[in-house]
Image: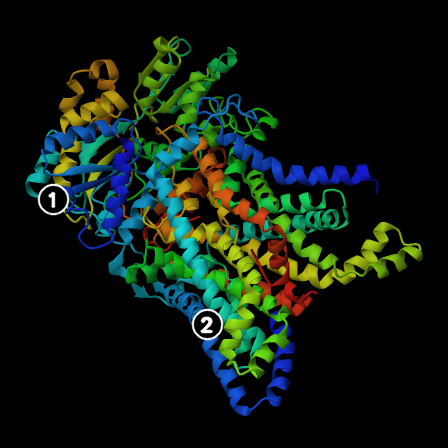
Amino acid sequence: MRWGRRSRAVLCAVLAAGAAGCGGGSGGVPVVNLYNAPQENLAVIVERCDREAKGAYRIALNTLPRGADDQREQLVRRLAAGDPGLDVLGLDVTWTAELAEAGWIREWKGAHAEQAAQGTLKQPLETARWHGALYAAPYTTNVQLLWYRSDLMPEPPATWDGLMKESARLAGEGKPHYGEVTGAQYEGLVVWFNSLVESAGGSILSPDGEQVALGPPAERALGVMRAFARSKAADPSLSNTKEDDARLAVEGGRAAYELNWPFVYAAMAADRPEMVKHFKWAPYPGLDGPGRAPLGGANFAVSRFSAHPEAAFAAALCLRDPESQRIAATKDGLPPTIEAVYRAEGMAEAYPMRDAILKALRTAAPRPKTPTYQNVSTVTAVTLSPPAAIDPPRTLATLKELIGDALQSKGVLP
Amino acid sequence: MSEGGIAEGDAREVVSKGRAVLGEGQRAERRLGLWLCAPAALVMLLVAAWPVVYSVLLSFQRYDLRFPGEKAWIGLANYGTVLASPFWWNALGVTLLVTVVSVALELVLGMALALVMYRTLLGRGLVRTVVLIPYGIVTVAAAYGWKYAWTPGTGWLAGLLPEGSAPLTQHWPALGVIILAEVWKTTPFMALLLMAGLALVPEDALRAAAMDGAGPWQRFRLVTLPLMRPAIVAALLFRVLDAFRVFDNIYVLTNGAQDTSSVSVIAYHNLIGGLNLGIGSTMSVLIFGVVALVAFVFVKGLGASAPGEVR
Amino acid sequence: MGRGGWAALNALVLLYALVPVAWIVSLSGKDPATVTDGSFWPTRWTWDNYRGIFADGEFTRGLANSIGIGLISTAIAIVIGTMAAYAVARLAFPGRAAVLGVSLLVSMFPQISLVTPLFQIERSLGLFDTWPGLILPYITFALPLTIFTLATFFREIPWDLEKAAKIDGATPFQAFRLVIAPLAMPGVVTTAILAFIVCWNDFLFAISLTSSSRARTAPATISFFTGASQFEDPTGSIAAAAVVITIPIVVFVLFFQRRIVSGLTSGAVKG
């Protein structure tokens, strides 16, 4: 089955080499090529939409590489070449501005835009906009929470200071005391920094995305990162930790808590059923009170070079409709962007923390919007790594200079 | 260069022969020569020379595919940007380090390997054949082998390290693994070139030295090495230029994380990841310049000649 | 040194060449559950990884691209390279030094310097992500090697035979076709193998100038493998694919060992 679809997609890509694309495939049914990050049960959603389409189109599922950078690289390379073999693109929330500005994805207008916005949570919808126009339909969202072991930490602190104190107390008692954060030199480090800056009341870029903002809130954020990386809470491998390493450290009993996406809960339930009853969640910590949690997720966009955009818009809308989102949430653990889905069937079992997610989404901290996000993120991650070596005033100055260059696309990527 | 040298020898032979033949035949020969070379020359000019000129033109422009509206001629500004970037200098440093260390190791190991292959009588065919395997393996395939060998939990080499160490996630250990992968793959090639050089050393000279009481090390240092000098310099030139282009191993092993980008990797990131044709071309031109400089130094300073002449 | 000493040295050389290869082979034989057990040999050999990569159209397609692009590039490079090498080795004509000079320059060329301009040129010509888009640079990088190696072989061919043919009334082209070409055949075969290895090995052009499985060659396909789920590394599949793309070259190399060694060391060749 999988083979059949793949080979058809290949054939389609070959045919698309011409001008006509795959539109004229067997029986005149347009084939919509969907490119998305690996998602285990996406095929279930695709089959459902094929059935719903009743012959109006057929979706060919193509899987992108695992890493976000690799996914983006493959998409932009094909878009830069004007490849007509792409129709619906699964985009990370941070790519909207870049692809929209380059003119590679279509604006959502009229009925399509209305349908995409209907009942959709405000924060995820905002990630699909650029300069006031809608360029994608929100599919899934994501928000980080504080995940902790209640047997070690009965009262979850609301601030980073509180976390460091708890770690010091646990260390004094000879108990597992590490707190896992995504401290490796990659997007996760930028996510952490962005959240801290926003929690401190600032932002990395100005609202229009054209200037560097940073300033005193960023300096405070840098101070917290440095202090955390040098405190009892810091795992020795902090500067190499990504999401999955953080999850494994808690599951393995080395760490007392982690700042991570909700997938860790299902994983804990599956891997360590005996630990899950003490595995609790709390709002993402801030500087003076509750913080603004990192916001993630994915949206569907339609390629400028699609040969049959109408079918592509229709397919994208089906792939993110309430039932598709419910399947993605219950089968693959991806939080929905349509509020009503949180109350749908099966959600209470899959998402005991759904109210916490919804609450966190309201104040979540989106990442800066700029067509050069890739460059901004790369230089930020390089400058902040390793977190223990941050020297707030000096690091801030470097960040200002490098991000400023990156915004004008005259910066050099490492 | 060297090939030109051999060719000139032949040319004289050809020319003197040509004089004996009719003038008409000589002209036909000239025409044929030009026609026979034309396709090859055309391909090389179209696919190598024109792109180089084109990349020089691109390097004077602000040209980011994501901002098609902002394309403009900006003179040398891209060069200023790249040359002021610590990332560029770090990549150049990494490239030079990898080049120097791996070529030095290859020379020593390759010489040892060449001596073993040249002097051994037992299982000579087997050794000479098996040693070609690293040369034959696709670089990317071998790189994945090394990557998994050093990945904690998966790899047999990582298993030999202390608990919790992940060499590919740290700067110096990662560079070490990159150099190891380079050295493993290319030492056999170096050894083959050096073995061809060993064949130049007359047995008589070695015997005479032995009669004069020279030990094995003295014979190697005072007789073999000086006679092999042209072969060594030529092998070094080719390996240095090749090592300078290092890309595949780094792309697979670290993809430039932990400041391990080589100049090829950083140029690739700026072109394909950043879609910045201006900056990418500037780096391309700078890399080309460095390679030309290295080749010039070898040819003028060390009198390098291609292995072909060594015979 | 005694026999034992040489035997030990030889054994060391064999280990050097074979252990890393054995590791990839063994990794490709591990089943997904034991791939992260860190042992050198699999506890249980399985063909699943091989079945997996061939069940997926992507890799088969990559192999087909690799073979097709490699053979076409090699054939063209050999044809035009043979012509040029013959001229360089045997004929007196102006511009001979220039041909050799340009070839030498190209052979030392950093490929990355070509990637940026070619990316842009091929995008505008519609050659991006097509077979010709890869064949062109491959021919270019195989040509210097072809010209140098073949010129060396041609110089070793007895000159008198050609002279005799000419005296018998053959034109220079007939002399080339009827006398020299058959004698040069072994050299051409060796050179073709070396040129094919160059094309087969390429990674930088393959990932930069393609964007889909339409023209992506096998080494590039491997680097785009995805695991079954987001958190599963496709280790076994990558190892199996690495073994598959390595086999043809290793077979070539072992089979033509003597010729390859002479080809590598005789011309100004970099393989």
C212, B66: nearer the viewer: C212
Give me the residue at 21% from left, 14% from top. Answer: A348
Quarter of the image with the C terminus of chain B is: bottom right
**Residue B41 — which label?**
2
The three-letter amino acid code for the residue at tag 2 is Ala
Q: Is residue A134 left or right of residue B231?
A: left
Q: How busy is the neighbourhood of tag 1: few (under 14 within 10 Å), some, or many (20 plus)?
A: few
Question: Looking at the picture, how far across and down is residue A14, in whole percent?
Answer: 27, 49
- B206 vs A386: above or below: below
Quarter of the image with the N terminus of chain B is: bottom right
Give the quadrant of residue C104: bottom right
The three-letter amino acid code for the residue at tag 1 is Gly
- A159 vs B64: above or below: above
Q: Name the residue at the front extreme.
A: C168
Q: Chain of mark 1?
A: A
B248, B67: nearer the viewer: B248
Question: Looking at the picture, how far across and down is residue C179, in whole percent?
Answer: 55, 72
User: Helix, strand or loop at disc 2?
Assistant: helix
Question: Looking at the picture, how far across and down is residue A342, in whole percent?
Answer: 18, 20
B60, A57: nearer the viewer: A57
- A224 vs B120: above or below: above
Give me the residue at 32% from left, 38% from top. Answer: A64
Question: Looking at the picture, how far across and down is residue A275, in whole percent?
Answer: 39, 10
Q: Is residue B2 left or right of residue B49?
A: right
Question: For mark 1, what is the residue?
Answer: A28
Q: Name the residue at the left extreme.
A: A111
Q: Tell me the CA gap for discs 1 and 2.
A: 48 Å
Instruction: Point out the frontmost of discs 1 and 2.
Output: 1
Residue A29 visible in the shown view: no
Q: Chain of mark 2?
A: B
